[in-house]
Amino acid sequence: MDIENLMGREFRCKRCGEIHRVSTLYIDNGPSGEIPLFLRKAAGGKNKILLLADTITWEAAGEKYGKLIEKEFNITPVVLSPEKEKRVTARESYLPAIRKEAGSADIIVTVGTGTVTDLGKITGEETGKPVISFPTAPSMNGYTSPVAAYIKEGLKLTIPVKPALAVFSSQEVLSNAPMELIKAGFADSLAKAFANADWQISSIITGESFCSMPYEIVSASEKEYMEKGDMLLKRDPKTLDKLMEALNLGGISMSIAGKSSPASGGEHLISHFLDMYSHLYREEIFAYHGLQVGTGVIFSSLLYEEMKDLSAGDVKILLQETSQEYGKEFERLVSLFPTAGTLLEREFREKMRQIMILRESLHDKWEDIKRKAFPMVYETEKIRKVYEKADIPLHISKLGAGEELVLDSLILARFIRGRVTILDLAGETGILEKVARKYVMGDYT
């Protein structure tokens, strides 16, 4: 699939018949000489640039890129420092300082990873300014994605934004990225099979539109590096390039879908839950987003395996035998995240609407779900071997979370978003809590 020919284009998909758009115009991991040329085109003759970084990414690459373009552009650096936390995370409290300088800028240039990129894209969306992304690590797929994640009023939100107009990667910068960020990108990239399977499930249950093209894109790219976790640990340039390419393709797959579904399923909700907890109760996150997602992938794979041999008759019986105490679950959520009460209530209402649809239709649609969604995911043992080769944590407890929090994250994470995932199928059939408790007790380690 020639992705380059799709960039900056709108086209009708031969698979689903829908119109898809890819807004990103240019992705380059080559000579830095291309950067001023592209910026001149993007600026349309204007020359004011907001250069956004944090204290870590400024030192890693921000100052370097600033010097590269300062001869031709009027640069205003915005370097974020941590506020009541050990490192800058994507919190709404950082946005006012960025907005203040963005008003007079012609372009926003982000130098960083997930946090800096998402804060820059949110500001770009608000102000109508184009965003150019300079990644400092192959850690996530948000550089080219049409969404941004941040914490607002205590809830981790994912909102639609314009993708970066261009992404410029430096092999030298990526090779020197912290190893935990490289591993995070690797773990996060392998969540895509599970995210697409969850999207397929949602489309069957709720009628949400589904397209196979995003899954085909990420599946093809995974084969280039999936078995090479040991080479990533050695910072092999070719493997790092393949990982970065796959992450950018993951972002483009979201642009094609017009939403985060091809890259974010139940495994991401578990990570978001942990981020929300860290925001309220800790000075730092448990681990980088992708590493948290990696543990969510393991848990999701366990749920798929637990349910793969069920018949439609089995599902019907389990639905009849399982009664949920949704009120108590919502109360538990609000007790954990009191500042997010209003936003949680909105998501919870939508989730209840979808759960009613799920409970009414799951029995009739079960065989279709098994035929279309279940073959998309990897078996747990396969994921284990791939992650172990890259020295990636396999269990949430390895990230520093206690047993009670681990259990809460596995059982309650499904309620922080109003969309259907494998967590809901398992929850409504009584399988989620059973597997979660065994997981916490170490039965699957």
Image (cartoon, rainbow, N blue to C red):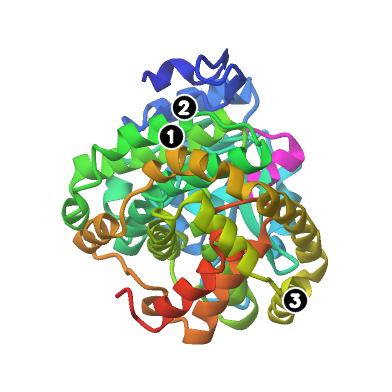
Q: Quadrant of the N terminus?
A: top left
Q: Quadrant of the C terminus?
A: bottom left
Q: Quadrant of residue 10?
A: top right
Q: Is residue 411 left or right of residue 95?
A: left
Query: At 62% across and 70% down in the image, what residue appears?
Result: 412
Of callouts 2 and 3, the N-terminal one? 2
Q: The residue under label 1 is which amino acid type?
A: Tyr
Query: At 44% across and 61% down in the image, what residue appears?
Result: 303
Give the numbered dot on residue 215: 1
Magenta stretch, residue numbers? 119-130
Location of residue 145 in the rendering, given as x and y in whole percent from the top left corner? 54, 39
Residue picked out by circle 3:
334
Residue picked out by circle 2:
213
Looking at the rendered structure, the secondary structure element under dot 2 is helix
Location of residue 374 in the rendering, given as x and y in whole percent from the top left corner? 42, 45
Location of residue 384 in the rendering, given as x and y in whole percent from the top left corner? 26, 61
| Residue 309 can be seen in this image | yes
Distance from Cα at disc 1 to Cα at disc 2: 5 Å
Of callouts 1 and 3, the N-terminal one? 1
Considering only vertical position in the picture, is 125 above or below 435?
A: above
Toward the viewer: 374 or 8? 374
Residues at marks 1 and 3 touching, judged by CB atoms closer than 8 Å: no
Distance from Cα at disc 2 to Cα at disc 3: 38 Å
Looking at the rendered structure, the secondary structure element under dot 1 is helix
| Residue reaching furthest to the right | 342
Within-10-Å neighbours for mark 3: few <14, some 14–19, many 20+: some
Considering only vertical position in the picture, is 25 above or below 119?
A: above
Q: Quadrant of residue 202?
A: top right
